[in-house]
Image (tube, rainbow, N blue to C red):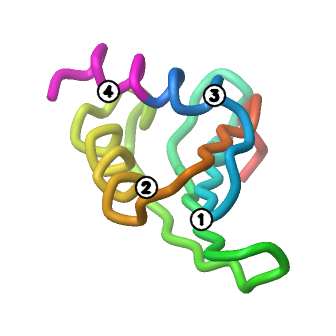
Amino acid sequence: MNLEKSQKRLTKLHKRGFHGYPLIEIQYFGQSTQLATKVVVGFTQEEGGQTFEESFIAQSEIRADEVVQTTLLKIIDRAEAKTVVIKEGILQA
C-alpha cells in the first residue's frame, strides 16, 4: 500500500471517533515538534484493561515511512480494533 493511501486510511479510522473496544492509540515522538522519529502503538482490549504497547523507531520522519504506516494498519486490522485514536502533536522524546 502506498504512503498516501495508508495515511488517508489512518486519518479516516481516527475521524470515526469512539466505537468501543478494542482500542488502538497512536502517539508520535521526536526531538522537535516538527520531526517524528518514534511511534508508540497502544492496544487496549477492554475498558479498564491493561494497555500493551509496541514502538517503532526511524532515523528520518516516521510519518513518511511507508513500511511503518502500512504496519500500523496491519496491527489495527489484526487486532480488529473498533476505535483508533491518533494523539495530536509530537511529544518530546
- Residues at badges 2 and 1 in contact (C-beta under 8 Å)? no
- Is label 3 in contact with label 4 (beta carbons under 8 Å)? no
61 vs 72, nearest the viewer: 72
Disc sitting over residue 57 in the figure: 2
Seen in the image, is 31 located left or right of residue 36?
right
Within-10-Å neighbours for mark 4: few <14, some 14–19, many 20+: some
Which secondary structure lies at badge 2? Answer: strand
The span picked out in magenta is 1-9
Which residue appears at 58% of the width and 73% of the height?
Answer: 53
Can you tell which mark lies on residue 22? 1
Side (left or right) of 46 relative to 73 = right
Q: At which x and y percent is residue 32? A: 71, 32
Single out the mark in the foreground, 2 or 1: 1
Is 15 left, or right, of 48 in this rendering?
Answer: left
Q: Please, what secondary structure does the residue beneath circle 3 have?
A: loop
Q: Is residue 3 magenta?
A: yes
Q: Which residue is mark 4?
A: 6
Could you say where residue 57 lies in the image, as x and y percent from the top left?
43, 55
Say which element carries label 4.
helix
Q: Amino acid at mark 1?
A: Pro
Main secondary structure type of the part rendered in magenta: helix
Q: Residue at x 62, y 48 (%)?
A: 83
